[in-house]
Image (cartoon, helix red, strand yellow):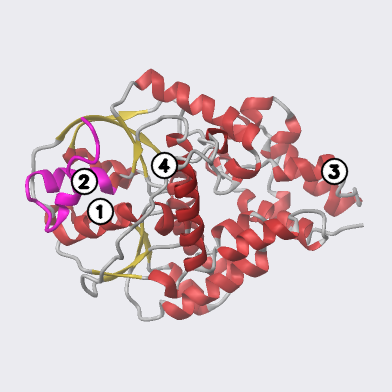
Amino acid sequence: MTTLGLDPEELGRCVQCGLCLPSCPTFRVTGDESQSPRGRIALMRAVEHEGAPLSAPVRRSFETCVQCRGCETACPSGVPFGHLMARTREVIVQSGLSTSRPVRAGYAALGRPRLVRAAVRAAALGQRLHAVPASAGLPPLPLRQAPLRRTGSDAHLFTGCVMDACQRDVHRDTVRVLAAAGFGVEPTGDRVPCCGALHAHAGLGRAARKLAAGAVRALGDGLPVLVNSAGCGAAMKEYGRLLGSDAARELAGRVFDVSEWLAPRMANLPEVRPLDLRVAVQDPCHLRHVQRVHAATRAVLAPFVRELLELDDDGLCCGAGGSYAFFERREARAIRARKLASIARSAPDVVASANPGCSMHLAAAGVPAVHPMTLVARALGAQGGARGAQGAQGRLGS
C-alpha cells in the first residue's frame, strides 16, 4: 500500500463542484472524468485514505495530466492542484512505477548545458539531412548560435537549458529590448544550467530541488532575475515552497517575467511606428495560471503592433506542457488541435507566445509563433530604436 503524503487540508479543499472541468484540456478532449482535476483528486483521496493501489489506470490518469494548472484559476476553493499533482508524481517515481532509466538520463542531461547544446545541434543537422522525421514534431532547430554577452548589471537574464539551446535568438532580442529601455543584464549562462521545472513535472523532485538550490546559490546577489520563459519563471517563483528556505523565498521574490518587469517601465522605451501585423496572444499556462501576469504581455506588445487579437478559447492549454508533448504525443496533439482551431478563427499574421515549449509545439504544426520580445525588438530595430536591435529586422514576414 502506497501513501502519497499529501497535505490533508489541501486535499480536502476540493468540494467536487466541477467548475474546473471546462478549464482542463484533457477532460475537454476525452470527456473522461478520470482525466479531469476533480477525478484525479478523487483518485488521490482513494490512494491516500482508502488504500487504493497505484494501479496502471490510476497512474495513467496522473501521467496524462498536462499540469497546466488552469483548474487552479477556475477553482473557487483554492485547491493547490499543481502541488498535489507534483507530489503524487514524485511518489509514483519513488515507488519505481514510472520514468525509466533512459528517461531519467535525458532529464539529467538538462543540467549539463554543453550536452544539451550538442544534442540540439545534432538534431538540427539531422533535420537538414532529412534524417529527423516530421512526425517527431520538432520545429526547425538552429545549427549555430553566437554567445550572449553581458551588457550591464541591472538584472540577471535567466537563460535556462532548452530555451538557450533552441531559442537563444529570443534571449538576444530580450537583451536588445532591455537595452533600449536603459537596462543592462548579465545572462546566467552555464552557472545556472536549468531551473528544474521539467524535473518537477516529471516527478523527479530530488533533481528539481538540487537544481533549484544551485540557482539560489548562484543568484544570491540581490539583483532582479528576469525570465522570458513562462515555465521557468513559474518554477523559480515557487522555489520557496519547493525548498522551504529563507534564501529560496528571497530569490523567488526577485524573479520577474520580462514583460512583467517592462510593463511599468514602458515610458523608457522609444516611440516607434508599430509593426504592420495582426498579432494573436497565446498565453502560456504558467504565465496565466501560475504567475498570473499575462496582462503584462499585452501591455508591452500593444504599442509595437498594429492590432492585438484575443483567442476565443479563454486561455485553454495548447498541449505543450514542457515535455508532455514529447511523451504524450497523441493527447498533446488532440489538445493542440483545439488551439489551432481558435487561432484559425482569429486569422492572425503572427502568434505571440512567451514560452519556448508552447511556441515550438505550435510551430511544429505550422503556426508562425514568436516570442513577444522578438516582435518588440523587431519594431525597435526597424527604426533604430534599440541599440543593436537591427538583427531582429526581417526575421518575420509581415
Q: Is residue 247 left or right of residue 199?
A: left
Q: CA distance from mark 4 to mark 1?
A: 18 Å
**Three-letter amino acid code of the residue under disc 1:** Asp
The residue beneath circle 1 is 173
Q: Nearer the viewer, mark 2 or mark 4?
A: 4
As helix, strand or loop, the secondary structure at mark 3 comes to: helix
The answer to if 226 sits in the magenta stretch is no
Looking at the picture, how far across and down is residue 383, in whole percent?
Answer: 7, 45
**Residue 140: numbered disc:** 4
Q: Nearer the viewer, mark 4 or mark 1?
A: 4
Q: Earlier in the sequence, mark 2 or mark 4?
A: 4
Q: Are marks 3 and 4 in contact (CB under 8 Å)?
A: no
The residue beneath circle 3 is 56
The residue beneath circle 2 is 376
Say which quarter of the image contains residue 101. bottom right
Q: CA distance from mark 2 to mark 1?
A: 8 Å
Q: Earlier in the sequence, mark 3 or mark 2?
A: 3
Look at the image and tell me whether residue 289 can be seen: yes
Q: Is 255 placed above or below 20 here?
A: below
Q: Is residue 300 left or right of residue 10?
A: left
Looking at the picture, how far across and down is residue 322, in whole percent?
Answer: 54, 48
Residue in the foreground of this view, choosing between 211 and 240: 211
Instruction: Give the farthest residue toward the top.
Output: 345
Q: CA distance from mark 3 to mark 2?
A: 47 Å
Label 3: how many residues lie within 10 Å, few (<14), some (14-19) or many (20+)?
few
Segment colored magenta: 373-398
